[in-house]
């Protein structure tokens, strides 16, 4: 994909995070792998108002060109691209139900087979570190492993995909699962699926939905 088209897509997906109620005002950030680096939403521009020319190219050494800085959370985007060649896009949001569970430092257990949409049997919660720090990035990569999403303690969630559309779909699904889990917990202790049941769900998920 050419740079102009990808810049437009980064801006569009950034706006979608607000329209899908995953982010408000300037929280969260979006990026897509491009060339020897990635295209990231800028710092200080409301997520719904990013223009394609404001999208910042960040090299893998963390340097960037132009007047606008990339989001202060560029480090975990960079580290996810460096560690995982299959990742083509990263969507980070402060979605309300994910934040609520992350404030309890609780990951999501296999209460619903749709957990498999995030690539595993649970959606873990990364340990807390200050936003924008290398420590936060290290915690996210450790929690995520090869999964497509994790919660971030007292902060939010991060989702990855082979492209922007898939990363956004994972973030939307994670928020839906957090809401469902939260609601189920109001009524009692949700019954968890077994390892074998989740194995079957993971197999069935290959070639379906966000895994397509
Ligand atoms: Zn954040």
Image (cartoon, rainbow, N blue to C red):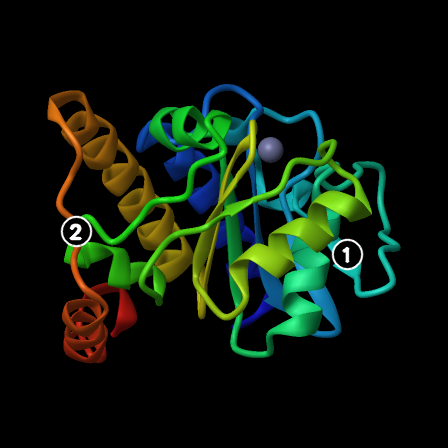
Residue 21 coordinates in the image, percent (x, y): 34, 27
| 127 is higher (above) or lower (below) than 86 | above
From the image, which quarter does the C terminus lie in?
Answer: bottom left
Mark 1 residue element: strand
Residue placed most toward the observer, 106 or 26: 106
Q: Position of residue 90 (x, y in %)?
A: 53, 55
- Within the image, what quadrant is residue 62 found in? bottom right
Horizontal relation, residue 94 to residue 170: left or right:
right
Tell me which residue sits at (70%, 41%) in the image: 73
Quarter of image, res 167: bottom left
Image quadrant of ligand 1?
top right
Q: Is residue 30 above or below residue 26?
A: below
Q: Residue 57, position in %: x, y? A: 74, 55
Q: Nearer the viewer, residue 68 or 175?
A: 175
* Residue at point 25%, 54% (across, down): 110
**On the rendered structure, is 4 left or right of 189?**
right
Q: Position of residue 41 (x, y in %)?
A: 63, 42
Front position among marks 2 and 1: 2
Marking on residue 21:
none
Q: Residue drawn at (53%, 59%), measured in percent from left and top?
A: 144
Numbered badge on residue 112: 2
Would the CB of label 2 be found within 8 Å of ligand 1?
A: no
> Which is more N-terminal, label 1 or label 2?
1
Q: Which residue is mark 1?
A: 58
Q: Is residue 15 above or below residue 171?
A: above
């Amino acid at each position: 994909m050419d740079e102009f088209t990808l810049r437009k897509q980064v801006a569009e997906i950034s706006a979608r995070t607000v329209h899908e109620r995953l982010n408000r005002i300037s929280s969260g950030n979006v990026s897509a792998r491009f060339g020897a680096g990635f295209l990231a939403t800028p710092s200080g521009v409301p997520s719904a108002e990013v223009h394609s020319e404001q999208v910042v190219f960040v090299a893998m050494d963390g340097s960037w060109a132009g007047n606008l800085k990339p989001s202060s959370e560029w480090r975990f985007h960079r580290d996810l691209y460096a560690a995982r060649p299959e990742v083509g896009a990263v969507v980070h949001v402060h979605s309300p139900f994910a934040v609520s569970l992350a404030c309890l430092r609780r990951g999501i257990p296999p209460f619903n087979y749709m957990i498999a949409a995030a690539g595993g049997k649970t959606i873990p919660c990364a340990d807390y570190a200050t936003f924008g720090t290398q420590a936060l990035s290290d915690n996210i990569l450790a929690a995520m492993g090869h999964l497509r999403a994790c919660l971030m303690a007292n902060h939010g969630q991060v989702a990855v995909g082979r492209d922007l559309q898939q990363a956004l779909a994972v973030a939307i699904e994670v928020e839906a699962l957090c809401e469902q889990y939260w609601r189920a917990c109001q009524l009692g202790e949700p019954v968890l699926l077994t390892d074998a049941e989740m194995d079957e769900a993971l197999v069935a998920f290959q070639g379906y939905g966000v895994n397509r």
